[in-house]
Image (tube, coloured by chain):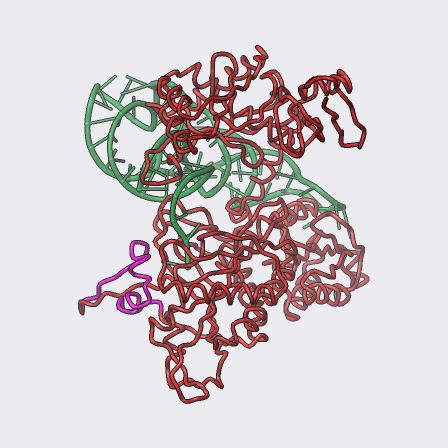
Chain colours: A red, B green
Amino acid sequence: MPVVTLPDGSTRSFDHPVTVDEVAGAIGPGLRKAALAGRVNGKLVDTSHVINDDVTLAIVTEKDADGLEVIRHSTAHLLAQAVKELYPDAQVTIGPVIEDGFYYDFAFKRPFTPEDLAAIEAKMAELVKADQKVNRRVMPRNDAVQFFRNQGELYKAEIIAAIPEKEEISLYGQGNWVDLCRGPHVPSTGKLKAFKLTKLAGAYWRGDSRNEMLQRIYGTAWADKKQLDAYLTRLEEAEKRDHRRIGKELDLFHLQEEAPGAVFWHPKGWTVFQTLIQYMRERQNAAGHQEVNAPELMDASLWQASGHLEKFGENMYLTKTPDERTYAIKPMNCPGHVQIFKQGLRSYRELPVRLCEFGKVHRYEPSGALHGLMRVRAFTQDDGHCFVTEDQITSESVAITRLILSIYKDFGFEDVAIKFADRPPKRVGSDEIWDKAEAALKAASDAAGIQYTLNKGEGAFYGPKLEFVLRDAIGRDWQCGTLQVDLNMPERLGAYYIDEHSAKRTPVMLHRAMFGSLERFFAILLEHHAGRLPAWLSPVQAVVLSITDRQDEYVRKVTESLKNQGFRVEFDLRNEKVGFKIREHTLRRVPYLLVAGDKEVAANLISVRTRSGKDLGAMAPETFAERLRIELESRGREVLEG
RNA sequence: GCCGGCUUAGCUCAGUGGUAGAGCAGCGGUUUUGUAAACCGCUGGUCGCAGGUUCGAGUCCUGCAGCCGGCACCA
């Protein structure tokens, strides 16, 4: 006789086995109607699930995160059902829940068109209206394989055939459509009220580029129309902060056809870029890293020795010179730094040797990978290599980790996730060396007191790495910094030092980058701030505006004085109304607008307005300069308007 | 690289086989202006590139390039 304990601690006893649906009904008809699924002893089940024993039960509705998950999963099924009804020849494959929605992959003889998408969506709406009951049944594995084979669903049959033989397979059906699924699902299609198909895409079967390409349909699904609309609005907002759009609006950079994946930096964009470099230079100098510069073009033999040519040759720019030598444009900086380390005999007393470079590298990325500044073929790394003894791995790694996190704080990124990427399938070096490298990096992570998640098999080919992932203002994640322990490359490139017993020893090389790619970091900053860069990074920090031409001389004088103090300031003497000028410079995201009319000239003041529209009142130019200086030096932690 | 879409003025975009358009920007003038768009006028295009079909192509077809959305890749 089951006793059901509800989340509020109350219990309900039944004298016969009951379904989740019946329990919900016993609590109230409203809850019964709202029930999408149940959580029995922590496990998510259908509302039709039968409870035989004493359990804890939570009724899952659209208000729960679990409920939303069930809605999305069921909407994916609804999509597949609609596709099968419209295009019986299409074969279904998989349809999982993803962030904000779901997708479903189909194999079909012709590509789906945007018109198909509209038709599918209409069919889905029709099926919702029909409010078909969703039912679950189980089948022995082999029967299930046969069942789907008979229906011509070869992909489904293949998936099921990979499940251990003795397991029972659960099938979900609605109308005359059936799919393999673990579930749970909503009780009927009428529960799916707010969804939208969003995009069509190709996707490889089982995620392997050697396999055939399937057609993926993406959709989003929510508990109600309001949430759906909010999501669509969120997408529009994200589009507004797209760095490609902002880059154009603010005249920061451009890309053009003749140089795919390479950036033409405009004066304002380059100002920001240089500010980033200058900042990083100060931070890494202070941390004892020495800046160097290595050739962009080096003989291919060096890349052969490092292993890069073999592993990444297809993605390297190679050039043959008239003297019949083959040079590679550097795709990374490590071999160059090793050459610098190798000059002269190094003593253990010199270690750690920390070399770093703002290295411009070129990688022939697959054409489909290019994406604005986020993924380019020519980019600048704040790349560094620390040559250390084995004993120094931990302390050095801890120092680097702390440096990276402190730097991110200066840019306003407090929410940093760290991932530990261990040995990849394709790698150089023995397993013993990898064991050692992974253990060392783990020890260092623990010593630094950081929490990380495992990113299995995602390490570099020469060593394990920590990946530092930033979360931006609208919740998107970006991998930027990295710290890698490398026990392979120094040996391959013949680097050594003399230890305290006068013996040759191979140093350990720690690879580190903080911005990662400056181009990418720049783009992340633009999107994070929606173009409103903090004043210390803004290409133009203030504009001095005249109201009539009577203030021209004063405006020039004030501007000149601020520029002489090192601020990035412009003036605007155009024959325009002050409202027009304010609108324009606000749209250009200039942090401070300094207005000078007859009143200000008479009193030797400027009226200060922020780009967010706040009036800071009239003040002497010197006062403004003093307060701006504090803001810049504190990197925005102390703001003028605060 | 793979699947699909897109490419028209500096920018955003309209233009479904018959003489290339709008708004903004730019330029010239009027206006001397007080915190998010004053007014008038003018300029501006090998319609991504190369072929083809047609009496006629921005529009239809083929190839290529770039970009966009995904997939795969990412030292």
Q: Is residue A536 above or below residue A588?
A: below
Residue A402, given in percent of the width and then of the height, sits at: 61, 66
- Using residue A352 as the reference point, say whether residue A226 is left or right of it: right
Does A639 lie within the magenta span? Answer: no
In the image, is A105 to the left or to the right of A173?
left
Residue beneath the point at 70% across and 48% down: A578
Q: Which residues are magenta?
A: A296-322
Residue A248 appears at what percent x and percent y? 51, 47
Quadrant of the snapshot with the C terminus of chain A? bottom right
Q: Residue at x 29, y 54 (%)?
A: A314
| Quarter-of-image position of residue A640 | bottom right
The front one of A641 and A597 is A641
Which quadrant of the figure has residue A543?
Answer: bottom right
Q: What residue is at 66 percent from the left and 48 percent from the top?
A: A586
Q: Residue at x 70, y 65 (%)?
A: A634
| In the depicted structure, whether residue A276 falls above or below residue A87 | below
**Against A117, is A287 above or below?**
below
Position of A481 with respect to A56 (left or right) is left
